[in-house]
Image: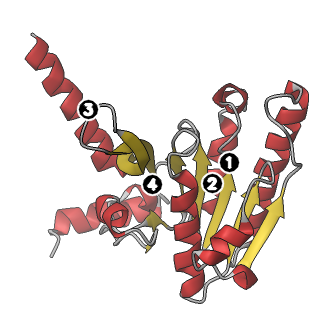
Amino acid sequence: MSSPAVQLLETLLQHKKFAGTLARPREATRVAASGIDALDQRIGGGWPLGAISEVVGARSSGCTRVLVSTLTRATAEGQVVALVDALDRFDARSAADLGLDLTRVLWIRGAPITIETARPAVIDHAIRQAVRAFDLVIRAGGFAVVALDLGDIPPRRLQALPAVTWLRLAHANEGRDTAGLLTSEEPMGRSARGVSVQIAAEPCWTGSSAQSRRVSGFTPILTPRWAGRLAVEGSRQVRSEKLKARR
């Protein structure tokens, strides 16, 4: 039990409408599982609800597989999900073969743009439209997962967006029962409570000699970059230890 002095101070703060400055017991973070056990174990059970998380990696690194796995897990639990497909690249048939229930997916398809030949103004317009759709779906509510796929868009085009864009999206999803998920080649807009996962593909080789060695496929490597405040503090500690080692 709090001491009389602490109770008096809390009463005064509440009377002056400063109750929001009082520390509250930390609630367990509610999450939406990705469906990949190894990833869920490293990010605290899944993507935090009420936050914006991101999966970043180069083309063919495995980002789409993580995205589809997350959507599949949610639909398997009877949830409804939404996917904003900025460039209309989503392969619905392959996703269905992996178990995604398409009847529970709101698929918002952007313009089918060829990035290599499209004018910057056309790409920027497609990005704005996709971000706007993502914002509207989150505000509508009722979706377990809302994903925005910007995977094939050059990072420099995404960096041209105002920083307030991601703050607005994080604010829109705050307190909701929705996991916001972004996919791109580089980090974009993870919110304070969200997580960021870097995916890289490691080649798998076959053959017993140098002449017979062949690439048989790729194994995705999942690396949480930031996972809330604790992970940020942890990364700072690692950097500090590296600096000490150099000295």
Which badge, 2 or 4, is on the more N-terminal residue? 2
Residue 54 point in image, percent of width and height: 53, 50
Callout 1 amino acid: Arg
Q: Residue at x 23, y 26 (%)?
A: 239
Callout 4 amino acid: Arg
Residue 171 point in image, percent of width and height: 62, 54
Residue 12's place in the image compared with 96, above or below, is above
Labels 2 & 4 near each other (Cβ < 8 A):
no
Labels 1 & 3 near each other (Cβ < 8 A):
no
On the image, numbered disc 4 is attached to which residue? 193
Labels 1 & 2 near each other (Cβ < 8 A):
yes
Which badge, 4 or 1, is on the more N-terminal residue? 1
In space, the residues marked 2 and 3 are separated at their CA atoms by 26 Å
On the image, numbered disc 1 is attached to which residue? 168
In space, the residues marked 4 and 1 are separated at their CA atoms by 14 Å
Circle 1 — which element?
helix
Q: Which residue of the protein is positioned furthest toward the bottom in this rendering? A: 78
Which badge, 1 or 3, is on the more N-terminal residue? 1
Callout 2 amino acid: His
Residue closer to the observer: 8 or 49: 49
Circle 3 — which element?
helix
Labels 4 & 1 near each other (Cβ < 8 A):
no
Circle 4 — which element?
loop
Q: Residue at x 9, y 10 (%)?
A: 247
Q: Residue at x 50, y 46 (%)?
A: 61
The part of the image, by quadrant, that contains residue 116 is top right
Residue 101 point in image, percent of width and height: 66, 82
On the image, numbered disc 2 is attached to which residue? 171
Question: Disc number at residue 236?
Answer: 3
The part of the image, by quadrant, that contains residue 28 is bottom left
